[in-house]
Amino acid sequence: MHESSRRNLLVVAHTPSPNTQALCDAVLRGASHPDIINVEVRHVRPLQAQPDDVLRAHAIILGTTENFGYMSGALKDFFDRIYYPCLQRTEGLPYATYIRAGKDGTGTRIAIEKITTGLRWRAVQAALVLQGDYDEHFIDDCEELGTTVAAGLDAGIF
Ligand SMILES: Cc1cc2nc3c(=O)[nH]c(=O)nc-3n(C[C@H](O)[C@H](O)[C@H](O)COP(=O)(O)O)c2cc1C
């Protein structure tokens, strides 16, 4: 496969706990499914991610905890720094979100949707909200999310 035909899937995920690290690992594992051949998946922590990472991406998966009814400060910092450099240059970018929330997740989902609406990114599925006590099925959900986005990118659906 020619290098230039490869599609870049960027995962910008905040992982402040062992559970959230496991969720991110599951997304990456799902996106690296052996049947998906033409997708390069890369995890960059929100505080490290730069506008160029987004400009190079063909799709993006956002992962965050809910803190104080909002996305993590780390993901908010990411949006603060990439918003204007990416505005009008990433319209239509396919994206998906997963949110780890001890109780709720709604405030985070709405906040992310407002920002991505401003950027004119395109949600490829409803936000995955992993709510309540930690449950092992969250791992399966995250793995499936990674596979869905990467397979869609691989197949040229997005
Ligand atoms: C400072 C702080 C604020 C939090 N605020 C919320 C909140 O507003 N809503 C919510 O659902 N969970 C909240 N949580 C719970 C976190 O979302 C949860 O601890 C995090 O996703 C990590 O999950 P884990 O215990 O499975 O690792 C908060 C946690 C912390 C540490």
Image (cartoon, grey):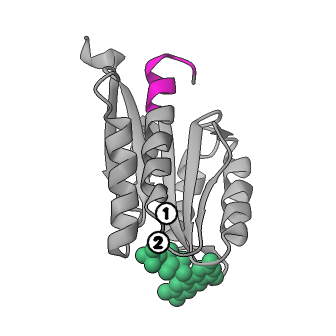
Return the x and y of residue 48 as percentages of the image width and height.
34, 62
Q: Residue at x 64, y 78 (%)?
A: 103
Q: CA distance from mark 1 to mark 2?
A: 6 Å
Front residue (pair 11, 82): 11
Q: Residue at x 34, y 45 (%)?
A: 28
Tell me if residue 45 comes above or below residue 51 in the rendering.
below
Tell me if residue 119 comes above or below residue 8 in the rendering.
below
Front residue (pair 88, 145): 145
Rendered-image quadrant of the C terminus: top right
Secondary structure beneath dot 2 equals helix
Quarter holding ligand 1 = bottom right
Tell me if residue 6 comes above or below residue 50 in the rendering.
above
Return the x and y of residue 153 as percentages of the image width and height.
48, 25
The reply to whether discs 1 and 2 touch (Cβ–Cβ < 8 Å) is yes
Circle 2: residue type: Ala
Could you classify mark 2 by the number of other residues whose Cα lies within 10 Å: few (under 14), some (14-19), or many (20 or more)? some
Q: Which residue appears farthest toward the top when viewing the image?
A: 1
Tell me which corner region of the image, top left, top right, bottom left or bottom right, holds residue 20: bottom left
Magenta stretch?
A: 150-157
Could you classify mark 1 by the number of other residues whose Cα lies within 10 Å: few (under 14), some (14-19), or many (20 or more)? some
Residue picked out by circle 1: 78
The answer to whether residue 46 is seen in the rendering is: yes
The answer to whether residue 15 is seen in the rendering is: no
Q: Magenta stretch: dominant SS?
A: helix
Residue 132: say if magenta.
no
Circle 1: residue type: Phe
Return the x and y of residue 126 as percentages of the image width and height.
68, 46
Residue picked out by circle 2: 74
Rendered-image quadrant of the N terminus: top left
Return the x and y of residue 37 as percentages of the image width and height.
30, 20
